[in-house]
Structure formats: C-alpha cells, structure tokens
Image: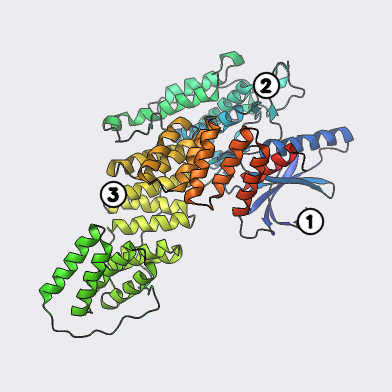
Amino acid sequence: MEVSMLKQRYQILTMVGQGGFGAIYQAADTHFPNLPKRAVKEMLMPSADPQEQQQAIEAFKQEALLLAGLMHQNLPRIYEYFEEGGRWYLVMDFIEGQTLEDCMEASVGNRLPFQRVLHFATQLCTVLDYLHSQQPPIIFRDLKPANVMVTSDDHLYLIDFGIARLFKPGQAKDTIAFGSPGYAAPEQYGKAQTTERADIYSLGATLHSLLSGLDPSDNPFHFSPLNLSQEAPAGPAFAKLIEQMLEINAQKRPSSVQVIKQQLQQLAQQPAKQAAASAPVTNISITNVPAPPPVQYEKSVPTTNVPPPVQYSVTPAPPPVTVSSSRSNVDDYINESKALIEMGRYQEALAVCERAIRLNPSSALIYINKAAALCGLERYQEALQVCNQALLYDPQNALAHYNASEALVNLERYQEALRACDQALRFDPSHSLAYINKSKALIELERYQEALATCEQATRLASPSASIYVNKAAALNQLGRYQEALPACNQALQYDPQNALAHYNASNALCELGRFQEALGACEQAIRFNPGYSSSYINKSWALIELERYQEALRACNQALEYNPRAAMAHHNASVALIRLGRYQEALQACEQALQLDPNSAKAQINKKFLLKKLRGY
C-alpha cells in the first residue's frame, strides 16, 4: 500500500497479512500514542464489476456493524470504519499471536496436543455461544484454523466476520452460499438456511483437523475416524462428540454449543478425578472446570546477578549515637512493638519504637518495626524514610526491603516496588509477603504472565497464603483464563474464607463465563466482607443486568459510585441498564459520564453512538 497515514490519524507500521479480499496492517493511533497498536483491515476490490464491488462493500460494512455491537473476551474490538482514496478500512484491536493454522504447521505432523485442543474447544464454544445468543442469532459461518488467532498464553480470538450473517426466522435458505471448503456445513451450499448447527459442523471440522493434522478441504464431508484412545482417558468420548458435530444431517448434531461445552468440561475433569477427594471450602461452584493445558512459567524471582541495594527515600538517617542502655530493654521494646503491630495497634507500636530508638538509634530491627507501624497508619512517605534508616545499619535485611515495597505499592510507584521486592527475595527467597507485593506490582504494570509465574514460585518456595492465590486469580482473569481463576479463588478461600478479594475475583471470572447467578452470589459475599469495595458493586450490576434485573442493577451502580465517584464502569453499566429500561436520555447522560472519566472506553463509545441514533441526535 502506498499510503503511510490514514484519516490523518492512523500511521501504518507494517503489513501483517494479505489475502484475496484484503490486507491487514499494524498501525499506531497518533491521536492516542500511548494506547496499544491497532489493526487496520483494508478491503481490496475483487473485480472491476460494479455489482460485485457493491456486494463486497456491503459485506465489509456488515462485518463492521456486526463487530461494533459485540463485546466479548474472544472477539477483537471494533473502533471505526471509513472510506479513503476509494478503499474501505476497518480499525480494530491488534492481536499479537499467530493463527491456529500457523500453530498446526509449526507442530509435528500438523497435530496439536489433546489437552491443548480441549482447552481451545472450550474457548470456541464460549464465543460461539455468545454469538448464537444474540437477538437475532449471529452465525459465524467460516470457522476454521486460519480464522482463529492464538496469543502467547493460548487465548483465542475469532477473526474475519466477513461472511457472518444474522439468522432470519422463516427464511428457507441463504441468499448466497459462502464458506470454506471442508469446514463449511452442507447447508451453506444452498440446501437450507444456515443455523447455529452450521457453526457446530465447522467447529467439529476444526477440532478434527487440529487433532488429526488432516486438511478437510482435501475430501469435503468425509472425515476419517479419530483414534484418541491413547491420548487421554477422555479421548474416545471426545472423538465421539466430534463425530456427532460432523453429521451431514444438521438435526443429528448437538442442539447447541452450550451442550457441547458442558460435555467438554466433563471430559476435561476425567483425568483429575483422583484429586477431587478433598472439596474446596467455598460456596463458589467450580463443577465442570476444564483442566488447563500444561504451561511452562518463566522464573521471575532473582537469585543471582541482582541489582545492588537501593535507597527508597531522600532523607538520610542520623549518625549512630552511643547511649548507655540495657540491651534487654531494647529487645523488650522490639518484641512489644512487633506484638502491637500484629494486633493492628499501630499508633501504640510507633510510640514504643520511638522509645526504643532513643535507647539505641543504630538498631535496624527498631526501624523495621517503625516502618511497619507507619505503613499500618498509611503514612507511606515516612515509612520509606525509616526503611532507608534501617538499611543503613543492615543493608541485607529482607524485612526492610519488604516494608519499602509495601509503602511503594500503596504509593502506586509499582516499578520501584518491584525492585524492592526483588531485593527482599534476594536476601530471603522464602519471604511470602514479598511475593505477594511483587505479583501485585506486576499486575498493576500489566505484566500478567510474570505475575502468574511469581505466584507459582511463591507456592513452591514460600508459605502459601490467601493473598498469593488472590493475586494468581487476578492475573488469570486478566489473561482471560477464567476457568483456571475459579480454583485459585477457592484455594484462597481455604486459607481465608472471608477474603473479599477472593470472592470478587470469583465474581469476575463467573461473569466472564456467563454464570451470572453464581457471580451474583460471589458479589454478595465480597460485599459482605468488604462493603466499601466499589468494584464488587460494579460486577454485581453486571450480573443483575444479564439476569434482566435492571432496577437492582441501577442501585448497585449507585452504590459503586458512593465508594468511588470516578468509577467509569459504574456509569457504563448504568447506561446499559437504562437502555434496557428504555430510558434513553438518562442512558446518554450515563455514557457521557463514563466517557468523561475514561475517554478511551470502547463500550461507552458504542453505547453513545447507539443512543444518539436512537434519539435522532446524529
């Protein structure tokens, strides 16, 4: 392509793919340079025939309009489409990764491991179920390995909605036959209108290809039997399920992808039945949670070549002063202040530390306890200064570095907090609290895979705790691995049944999985143990909206805003509830509030466009 800038906004960086009907480019949004890169899809005209050109343009617009109304973790977000220089462009999320087809080509025999395919199958069912549950249902019609992107953590995205269509009740057949040979169902060739079961056929063909390494386009509608008896205990049942998906008669296929997903979850549990003897202590159901694929986590705790000790404040400690004192009195003060800190009596602990410092101003332990008390009192800047004093007398003290990390995390200085955690773990590799702060800092820095690796190392090298599993669940949620996040929440609740964050993370995973009634219960538990956490009310409103309890959802949004007036998602969820109630003018005001707080919220932008059209303000 000759142009390097589109719409005086999108700077083209490189071409990442090209086919018969278009090309994909990676681009930078110059209006928002700090945002992630975008994908720009360019439509190439298939021929010089005006009628064919118009059909291509309409199909391109249909893809844009379909995606604009969808919001799902397995779909790229659409931002806009436009025409420039006689060509049409679509702007969407840029997905880092490769296609399933590329994964197959890079594997031995073009076959992927059984457990990995099972993991992929569950994700595909989740996103297809979301499409089929739209009103009217959206039929994807072109599911195949080349149209599925895989990220580095095995998260899937459906791409290329160019031939997706809305199901129209009463229509005898499709206007035009579309689909990829070998993957398209027979009814896509003019025999009948394509329904959800056409996507089920394509899903079966895709899974068969992933497991067998065979290309179904070589012999359409004919699939050799899968021999999975050696793959896993669930192998034969999985092969039978795929065979049912590939029935020529659509009525003989499973009735929905939701039914298929339930069977897949049951199959995924079979290898782990022996481990189910001890049930987790929680009311959050994790029945039918699929086993995650094997993952090799990167080691993230430094053991060698670590940076030298750092200073955490600019205020130096006073020089040591020799004071005649009784050592036993100083030790008593240290022990007393430590006990007071453990009881949460931070002001008293601080007073004890001050008395101890007057007796012996060169004891690192006294300053360590003082820093802990100051952190408990949320006086984090002072805590950093005191950590520095402790490190003057004992540069290798892990507790001093940990207390510095605690202050830095709460000051939202996450990069510095990360260094402090690494220093603490350098001198005490089993310091579980340092792992907790490190994983939290990594999550805030959006380094989710490293945060997950840190949590895994903590469970191996340190004493497991509720907070470690809470952070693990948070990282898994951010990575879109919601089925795995639920067991992590349950493990957290085994250590601390009243941990509000564990219940909140469970509610987040359950909402993403579409299990809204359970999510509502998890939100109530989170609110019970921490009534002031606004995010729990936001998730509660999300679940209530999906359960069509819109008035209650609005109340939950108001509660979220009581505790955090800058919660953009609370305004967004309120706009959704108001739209469902037909209160469009109020919904528009809620969208404006959301965008004022978060101008880059794609969800709020989509709702605003819908409302402006509805109110004829466009």
Alpha carbon separation for disc pair 2 and 3: 51 Å
220 vs 33: above or below:
above
Residue at position x 37%, y 75% in the image: 311
Residue 608, x across and y down, in percent? 68, 43
Task: Kindly identify which residue carries mark 1.
Answer: 3
449 vs 416: above or below:
above
| Res 230 → quadrant | top left
Whichever of callouts 3 and 1 sits on the residue coming sooner in the sequence is: 1
Label disc, if present, on residue 513 of the rendered structure: none
Residue 332 in the figure: left or right of residue 405: left
Residue at position x 54%, y 36% in the image: 110
- The amino acid at mark 2 is Thr
Task: Kindly identify which residue carries mark 2.
Answer: 194
CB atoms of marks 1 and 2 within 8 Å: no
Q: Is residue 102 visible?
A: no
Name the front one of labels 3 and 1.
3
Local packing at callout 2 (Cα closer than 10 Å; few below 14, some 14-19, many 20+) is: many
Residue 174 in the figure: left or right of residue 108: right
Q: Nearer the viewer, residue 500 or 454?
A: 500
Alpha carbon separation for disc pair 1 and 2: 39 Å
Name the front one of labels 2 and 3.
3
| Res 371 → quadrant | bottom left
Whichever of callouts 1 and 2 sits on the residue coming sooner in the sequence is: 1
Whichever of callouts 2 and 3 sits on the residue coming sooner in the sequence is: 2
Residue 435, x across and y down, in percent? 34, 56
- The amino acid at mark 1 is Val
CB atoms of marks 3 and 1 within 8 Å: no
Label 1 element class: loop
Residue at position x 27%, y 69% in the image: 370
Task: Kindly identify which residue carries mark 3.
Answer: 464
